[in-house]
Image (cartoon, rainbow, N blue to C red):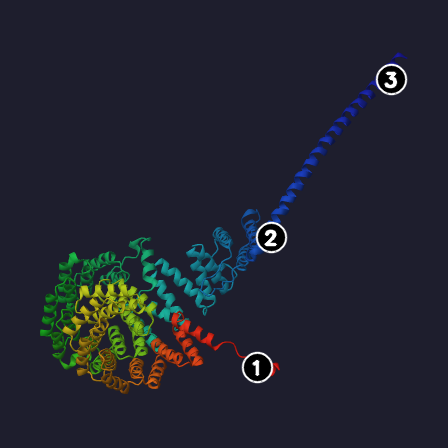
């Protein structure tokens, strides 16, 4: 019994212990559940907050992308690149080559969706912001996969556009690869070749650039830009293709000079120079004397004198008997005034080797201020070679610059007939004729038309022999301007600027032409361009003085003309213009001094005598003014302004009866001379012949609608005659000329007040 009881009690104890254990575990589970509930609540709050933040971020991104729709698809491109990277590199499964190509091609096409390659009006191709970093990732993928352009399944246009993107991130090797592939797939697409040529320019790879230019010409044989660039690139190396390009441009009507002295260098050589400073020079060093000489010539064209000198010295080291190299060596040394002696020695070495160096030698002497030495060198050449037209023309120019005009002409007159088959002699002949005509103008006030015709014939003869002579076209332009043919002159100037764009006389001549045509702002711009090279030339302040005078800036114009006369006291036009400006400003003493100087030194200059008479009239010295006018009329009886001024003087001296004759003569010579009509109207007004005076005043106003004095006289006569309606109309015409004229405005108000309101109609009221 006891054993059974003990067993039962033991069983109950075990059951109680089990129940206690279960209860304790239940409590632990409940506590665990509470903790999990708390954590879940916190997590739910965090998830809700994160969801709200993601929603806010999403709305913000949508807002930003709505303003830049081009970026919306970049997310897809990003995903495509992520997938490509994962499939190709981040999984353990090997991908076949065909699958790799498909994956990389798909990634490339996804990027190209956002780059159509369309250019704007300026030729600039827009790239969606954020696209280039994706292109860098694509480049990394292709590098990792060791793929080239030919591995991708793309069209020629797609290859070209990818090349442009790689070029945009400075992956030039990759870009070149894609450009070449684009050209092979689309041979007629010139854009890929142009882009490839750009890379070759940047790298300085001349041979590859030449090949690309030739391919471009195969696509478009008349591409002027390519023709010019290749002609420049091949100058001195492949004359056959240079000649081909030159003839092709001539057929297209394009003027182009590929000589060293007249070529306006394109970007090619400068970019090549910049690139060559960054690469190993030993890899591109020429091996022959001619190669070094070619490099020196191109460096000279871009102004790299020091480096060019090193190259030509290398050419002489390879071949001391290279005459062309000695000539270029002399030209480079002549830039440095301290090395003139060395330059002359190089010329003599070149001459001994059969090169033609007399012109360069004379230029060196002339630049050094040794005109006698320059003349002696040329004269010595002509003693043994009198038919040398270039040396003869140069000697004539040296003598002309030295002021020996007659001697300069004599040199040309002694030229043998065969020399005149060359353009330089005709150019000098034209220049001397122009100088003769200018001297005639300074002494008489007008050009000698026969001499001008001789000058024009000479310049035309030079052009017939050498249509690329820029100096001949420049001389033709000036001759035509002197002959009052501005349109033809402008055409000739355009040709001259095209042929010798750096010649400082081009903008000066253009400025003079613009002055004649009334384009003052354009003239000012052109003279500023010329001043960069000819700051000390008297023509600069002279033209600026003319511009200032025409803009009524008299004080400034007088100062500028004075600057001209300080360096050249016998500058006739500057002194004459200063006289006129001083007269307009009221500085009669200065004006009279200039007029006296001109009359004394150039007694045949009609304009000087006319200005002197006007100054004397302003002084009230009517007797001396009349005497000056009569001296002028002795030489030119038909001078209308002198006749008008003579009539004014006679009226002022109470000799009105005598004044009618010169005024009538002036009107017979020029019936449109408004001042003559006006002065005779004043004369008739003094005579009391009101109807005749009104007729003359009306003629004066008709021939010069801005003649305010004539309109004032007309209005005054009508006002005094009580013709209120006519007077009011006349006063209005005065105000049309000068809206601020107080007398006209007051008289017009008087006419309105006297006319009064209209009278009422009594019959209508009744």
Residue occupying image coordinates x 51% and y 55%: 131
Q: Which residue is mark 2?
A: 62
Q: Which of the image's four quarters has the N terminus?
A: top right
From the viewer's side, name the closer residue of 711 and 375. 711
Q: Whole-Å distance between the Cαs marked 1 and 3? A: 149 Å
Q: Which residue is mark 3?
A: 8
Report if residue 322 is visible in the image.
no
Q: Is residue 388 above or below residue 98?
A: below
Find the residue positioned furthest to the top: 2
In terms of secondary structure, where does tag 2 sit? helix
Residue 741 lies in quadrant: bottom left
- Between disc 3 and disc 2, the foreground one is 2
Q: Earlier in the sequence, mark 1 or mark 3?
A: 3
Residue 683 lies in quadrant: bottom left
Residue 225 lies in quadrant: bottom left
- Between disc 1 and disc 2, the foreground one is 1
- Between disc 1 and disc 3, the foreground one is 1
């Amino acid at each position: 019994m006891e054993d059974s009881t003990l067993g039962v009690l033991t069983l109950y104890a075990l059951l109680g212990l089990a129940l206690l254990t279960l209860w304790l575990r239940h409590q632990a589970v409940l506590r665990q559940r509470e903790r999990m509930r708390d954590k879940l609540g916190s997590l739910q709050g965090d998830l809700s907050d994160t969801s709200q933040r993601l929603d806010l971020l999403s709305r913000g991104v949508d807002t930003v992308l709505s303003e830049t729709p081009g970026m919306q698809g970049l997310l897809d491109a990003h995903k495509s690149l992520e997938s490509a990277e994962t499939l190709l590199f981040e999984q353990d499964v090997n991908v076949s080559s065909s699958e790799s190509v498909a994956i990389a091609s798909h990634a490339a096409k996804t990027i190209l969706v956002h780059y159509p390659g369309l250019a704007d009006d300026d030729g600039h191709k827009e790239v969606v912001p954020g696209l280039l970093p994706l292109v860098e990732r694509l480049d990394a993928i292709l590098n990792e996969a060791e793929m080239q352009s030919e591995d991708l399944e793309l069209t020629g246009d797609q290859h070209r556009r990818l090349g442009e993107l790689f070029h945009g991130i400075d992956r030039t090797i990759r870009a070149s690869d894609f450009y070449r592939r684009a050209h092979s797939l689309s041979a007629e697409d010139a854009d890929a070749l142009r882009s490839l040529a750009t890379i070759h320019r940047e790298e300085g790879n001349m041979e590859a650039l030449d090949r690309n230019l030739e391919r471009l010409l195969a696509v478009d044989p008349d591409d002027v830009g390519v023709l010019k660039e290749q002609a420049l690139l091949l100058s001195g190396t492949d004359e056959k293709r240079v000649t081909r390009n030159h003839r092709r441009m001539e057929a297209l009507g394009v003027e182009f000079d590929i000589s060293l002295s007249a070529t306006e260098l394109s970007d090619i050589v400068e970019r090549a120079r910049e690139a060559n400073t960054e690469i190993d020079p030993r890899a591109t060093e020429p091996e022959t004397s001619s190669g070094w000489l070619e490099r020196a010539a191109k460096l000279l064209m871009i102004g790299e004198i020091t480096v060019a000198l090193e190259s030509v010295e290398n050419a002489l080291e390879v071949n001391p008997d290279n005459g062309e190299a000695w000539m270029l060596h002399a030209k480079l040394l002549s830039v440095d005034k301290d090395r003139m002696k060395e330059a002359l020695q190089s010329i003599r070495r070149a001459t001994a080797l059969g090169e033609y160096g007399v012109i360069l030698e004379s230029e060196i002497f002339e630049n050094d201020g040794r005109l006698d030495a320059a003349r002696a060198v040329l004269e010595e050449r002509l003693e043994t070679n009198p038919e040398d037209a270039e040396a003869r023309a140069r000697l004539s120019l040296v003598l002309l610059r030295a002021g020996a005009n007659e001697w300069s002409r004599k040199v040309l007159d002694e030229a043998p007939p065969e020399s005149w088959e060359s353009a330089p002699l005709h150019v000098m002949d034209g220049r001397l004729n122009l100088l003769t005509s200018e001297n005639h103008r300074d002494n008489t006030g007008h050009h000698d038309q026969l001499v001008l015709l001789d000058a024009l014939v000479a310049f035309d003869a030079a052009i017939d022999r050498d249509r690329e002579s820029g100096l001949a076209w420049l001389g033709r332009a000036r001759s035509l301007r002197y002959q009052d043919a501005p349109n033809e002159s402008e055409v000739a100037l355009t040709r001259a600027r095209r042929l010798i764009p750096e010649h400082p006389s081009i903008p000066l001549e253009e400025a003079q032409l613009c002055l004649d045509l009334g384009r003052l702002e354009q003239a000012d711009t052109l003279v500023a361009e010329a001043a960069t090279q000819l700051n000390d030339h008297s023509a600069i302040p002279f033209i600026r003085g003319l511009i200032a005078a025409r803009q009524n800036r008299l004080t400034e114009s007088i100062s500028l003309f004075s600057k001209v006369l300080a360096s050249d006291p016998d500058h006739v036009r500057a002194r004459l213009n200063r006289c006129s400006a001083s007269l307009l400003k009221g500085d009669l003493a200065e004006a009279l001094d200039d007029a006296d100087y001109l009359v004394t030194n150039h007694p045949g200059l009609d304009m000087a005598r006319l200005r002197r008479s006007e100054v004397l009239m302003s002084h009230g010295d009517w007797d001396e003014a009349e005497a000056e006018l009569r001296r002028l009329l002795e030489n030119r009886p038909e001078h209308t302004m002198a006749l008008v001024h003579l009539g004014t003087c006679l009226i002022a001296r109470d000799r009105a009866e005598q004044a009618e004759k010169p005024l009538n003569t002036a009107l017979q010579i020029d019936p449109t001379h408004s001042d003559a009509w006006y002065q005779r109207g004043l004369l008739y007004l003094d005579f009391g012949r009101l109807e005749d005076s009104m007729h003359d005043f009306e003629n004066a106003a008709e021939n010069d609608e801005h003649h305010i004095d004539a309109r004032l006289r007309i209005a005054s006569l009508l006002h005094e005659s009580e013709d209120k309606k006519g007077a009011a109309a006349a006063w209005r015409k005065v105000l049309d000329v000068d809206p601020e004229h107080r007398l006209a405005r007051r008289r017009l108000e008087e006419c309105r007040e006297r006319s009064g309101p209209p009278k009422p109609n009594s019959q209508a009221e009744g």
